[in-house]
């Protein structure tokens, strides 16, 4: 039996969560974006301002995080301005794993 989708029975993260954590922390931009959204919903401009990174980097990070179902768009796809993003359950689990294992330093 493969253990790819099974925790240890004691609340340990599944391999998928570790894979997603690795994906997130392999990019400072994705890490900053997911960390910001862990604090609450925000627009790309707000995230960029909070993290002191260009909006283009935020947009690219959001695209990847959405494709992996870690964050979601809270407004309609057609909306060009005021697009509000938020973290969803899987994203919260991955962020909690990243923080609990000391994989990111949010003081930077």
Image (spheres, grey):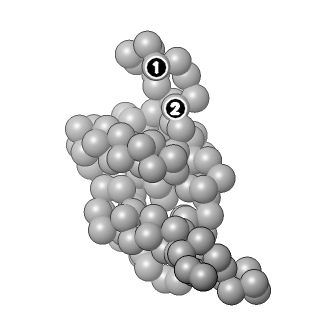
SS class of the residue under badge 1?
loop
Residue lying furthest front:
1
Q: Which residue sits at x=29%, y=63%?
A: 27
SS class of the residue under badge 2?
strand
For the C terminus, which image quadrant? bottom left
- 38 displayed left or right of 60: right
**Dot label at residue 53:** none
Q: Is there CB contact under 8 Å for labels 1 and 2? A: yes
* Relative vertical location of residue 26 with respect to residue 45 in this rendering, above or below: below
Q: Nearer the viewer, residue 29 or 64?
A: 64
**Dot label at residue 77:** 1
For the N terminus, which image quadrant? bottom right
Q: Which residue sits at x=30%, y=63%?
A: 28
Percent x, y for residue 40? 60, 46
Q: Which residue sits at x=55%, y=22%?
A: 75
- 10 displayed left or right of 33: right
Near mark 2 (Cα within 10 A), the count class, few <14, some 14-19 or many ≥20, is some
Percent x, y for residue 96? 60, 69
* Relative vertical location of residue 85 with respect to residue 104 in this rendering, above or below: above
**Dot label at residue 73:** 2
């Amino acid at each position: 039996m493969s253990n790819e989708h099974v925790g240890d029975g004691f609340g340990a993260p599944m391999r998928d969560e570790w894979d997603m954590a690795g994906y997130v922390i392999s990019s400072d931009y994705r890490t900053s974006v997911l960390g910001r959204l862990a604090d609450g919903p925000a627009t790309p401009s707000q995230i960029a301002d909070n993290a002191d990174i260009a909006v283009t980097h935020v947009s690219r990070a959001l695209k990847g995080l959405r494709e992996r179902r870690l964050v979601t768009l809270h407004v309609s796809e057609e909306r060009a301005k005021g697009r509000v993003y938020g973290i969803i359950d899987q994203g919260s689990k991955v962020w909690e794993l990243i923080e609990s294992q000391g994989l990111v330093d949010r003081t930077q």
